Amino acid sequence: MNKVAQNIVKVGGNIMIDNKNFLVNFSLGNFCNYSCSYCWPAVHSGTYPFRNFNFYSLFIDDLKDEIYKRKFESLTILFTGGEPTAYKFLPKVIKNFCNDDTRIKNNLLLNTNLSPALSWWDKFLKISNRANARFIVASFHHEFADIDLFIKKAVYLKEKGVGIIIRKVVNPTEQDIDYCIGLFHRFESEGLYFEMKPYLHNAPQKKDTTTIFVGKKIHEEFTNKMFNQLEEIQRSSKYISDAELIKISLFDDKGIEKNIDSEMGLFYGNGLDFSGWNCSAGYNHLSISHNGNIQRCFDVKNKEAVLGNIYEGTFKLHDEPTVCPVTSCSCITCLLTQKERING
C-alpha cells in the first residue's frame, strides 16, 4: 500500500469535493441475466433477489427528507446489482426518484450490461427526463453481448443526452489485452469512451479484532508492462471528458488541484492508503448491500458500519465525517467519497 504524498491533503470525486452532494451506491439485488466466466458469484447468483419496489422507493423518499434537512443540494444514486434492468419494477423506482419537488437535484447513475431492447431505453429516457443528470456505466460482456447492437444502444443514449462510459474487465493475458485494445479503438471510432478494468480478486485484510476489510486487488499475473500498456492507451482517449461526473481530484496543502487523467492510475496502480484520514462515508455517502443493509461504505465490515436496513425502515446518518478505519477503497463510489488528511 502506497502512502499518499505528504502535500496532498484532500482527495475525492468532483461531485463530492464540496460536501454539497449526497452519493448512494444502491445494490438492488444480485440477480443477473448474464453469468460471465470472470464475474464473482456474489454479484450474479440471485441469492439476494429483488424485492418489492416500495422498500426501495420509501427509503429514497426518507433519505431525501433527511438530506434536505441537512442542507445538501443534490442526491446522486448509482443503481446497480446484479443487473438492475432485470428488475421489472426498476422503472417505477427510477420514476419515483426523478419525479421530485424542487428541493434537491437528482442525479441518476445506472450500472448496466445494456441488454434491454431499445424500446426499454426509450421508456427509461421518458421516466427519467426530470433528473438533473443521467449517466450510464455500461459493461460490455463479449460472452453474451452482440457488439453492433450494444454500440447502437450506447450511441443512441449518448445522442439523447445521457452520459455514458463503456467498461470491460481485462484478464491478465496478452490475448485478452490485445482484444480489449481492439475494442478500445472500435468504441473510439463510434464516439464512445471505453475503460479497460484490470481483473481484480478478493484480498482479505484484518486490521484488528473488530474491523475486517475485504478489498480487491489487481491480479498478480498482470505485469507492469501489461498495466502500463493499458494505462497509456486509456489516457489517449478523445472522449475521456465523458467521465467528468465521476472524475477524481487531489488537492495539495496550497489548495491547488492535481489532475488525474486516468482513474486506472489511482485506483489500480497506486493502491493508496487513506487509513487515519477523515472520510465522509456515512455522512454524505451510503452503500446499500444486497440484503438491504445501509452501510457507510462497502469496505468497512464491522457492525458499527451498518447504519440501518431499508427493509426495516430505519437509518441514522453520521453528523460529520469520521476517521477511515481501512487501508484503501475497493469500488468507485467509495473512492469518490471525500477524504481529508488529519493534521499530525
Image: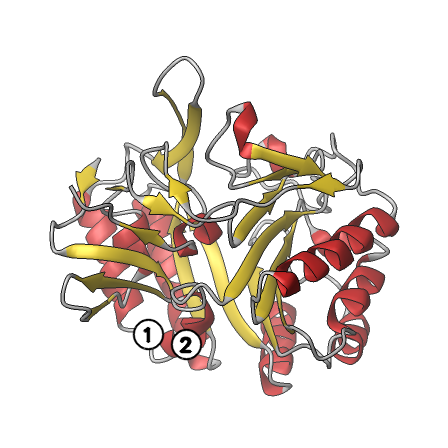
Q: Write the residue at 44% across / 52% down.
A: 332
Q: Nearer the viewer, residue 219 or 152?
A: 219
Question: Label 2 is placed on what type of residue?
Answer: Glu
In the rendered image, residue 324, in percent from the top left (x then y), is placed at 37, 38
Q: Nearer the viewer, residue 79 or 114?
A: 79
Using the image, determine if residue 48 lies above or below residue 16: above
Using the image, determine if residue 45 lies above or below residue 319: above
Q: Are marks 2 and 1 in contact (CB under 8 Å)?
A: yes
Residue 208 visible in the snapshot: yes
Q: Write the residue at 17% across / 56% down.
A: 8
Q: Which label number is shown at residue 309?
A: none
Dot 2 or dot 1: first in sequence order is 2
Quadrant of image for the C terminus: top left
Describe the element under mark 2 as helix, strand or loop: helix
Question: Label 1 is placed on what type of residue?
Answer: Ser
Q: Mark 2 sits on what residue? A: 188
Q: Mark 1 sits on what residue? A: 237
In the rendered image, residue 120, in percent from the top left (x then y), is placed at 80, 70
User: For residue 115, what is the image quadrant?
Assistant: bottom right
Given this view, does label 2 or label 1 mark the residue nearer the observer?
Answer: 1
